[in-house]
Image (cartoon, helix red, strand yellow):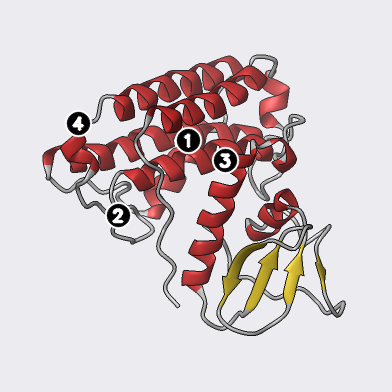
Amino acid sequence: MTHPMKHLPATEDTFRELAGAADRLLTDLDRLTDADIAAPSRLSGWTRGHVLSHLAAQVPALERLLEWARTGVERPQYADLRARDAEIEAGAGRPAAELAAEVRRTAAHFQQAVENLSEPAWKAVIRPFTGELCTPERILVIRLRELEVHHADLDLGYGFADIPDAALRTITEDVAGHLAQATAATTFELRDEQGAPIHRFGTGGPTVTGTRPDVLAWLTGRSAGEGLTTADGAALPALPGWI
């Protein structure tokens, strides 16, 4: 089964949603010290500095895709993943104030870039490094997802349960759709704690139930499935790695 990648419309409501996610993150950065930056994040192998370096460096990468949409001239998001990882590593050890300022500056620049993108450009076809063909409306989902998931990764008291419901639903659908594309072997259904369907992977298999925050933590590899259950108590299905 093919799962189309999630998009968000280029509307004032979407732009406000992005700005809100950025503001919540930036508020938490004001109190970080250099020691805080060097401490581990919730993302295995990354310090908080790595997370912030990634959030800052991601903006020009996404803006290259916006430029592709605007001009019609292909601009890859990254030269390759090795170059992306090297850029993150190079910025991870900077002082807290410098990293926070860069995340703030790039967030404002991205917000301006999407709000000023012309209507014809929103209909252009581009390709992020994950390979799917899409319009720039997909970039809005990617940025929202990165802001919210990596805010939780910083381990500053903001978790998946703090993500606003609309954003939580968008991000969960996006991650689930990506994982469903990545494997045809894993079959199961996801439902929330009230039994409402969240996503189906293939046909058949167990039903996995839990709160949407717990589901998203599991899908993104941030938890081993704490808070999730299956009807017969069986082990949770194996998931492919998430980007």
Residue in view at x 67 percent, y 21 percent:
28
Q: Quadrant of residue 147?
A: top right
Query: Regarding mark 1 in the picture, which secondary structure is present there?
Result: helix
Q: Quadrant of residue 41?
A: top right
Which numbered mark, 1 or 4, is in the foreground of this view? 4
Q: Residues within 10 Å of mark 3 (few under 14, many from 20)?
A: some
Q: Which mark is residue 118?
A: 4
Residue in view at x 61 percent, y 24 percent:
24
User: Which badge, 1 or 2, comes first in the chain's sequence?
Assistant: 1
4 vs 33, nearest the viewer: 4
Q: Amino acid at mark 4?
A: Ser
Evaluate whether residue 97 shows in this view: yes
Discs 3, 2 touching: Cβ within 8 Å: no
Discs 4, 3 touching: Cβ within 8 Å: no
Q: Amino acid at mark 3?
A: Ala
Evaluate whether residue 149 shows in this view: no
Determine which residue is flagged by label 3.
Answer: 167
Q: Which mark is residue 134?
A: 2
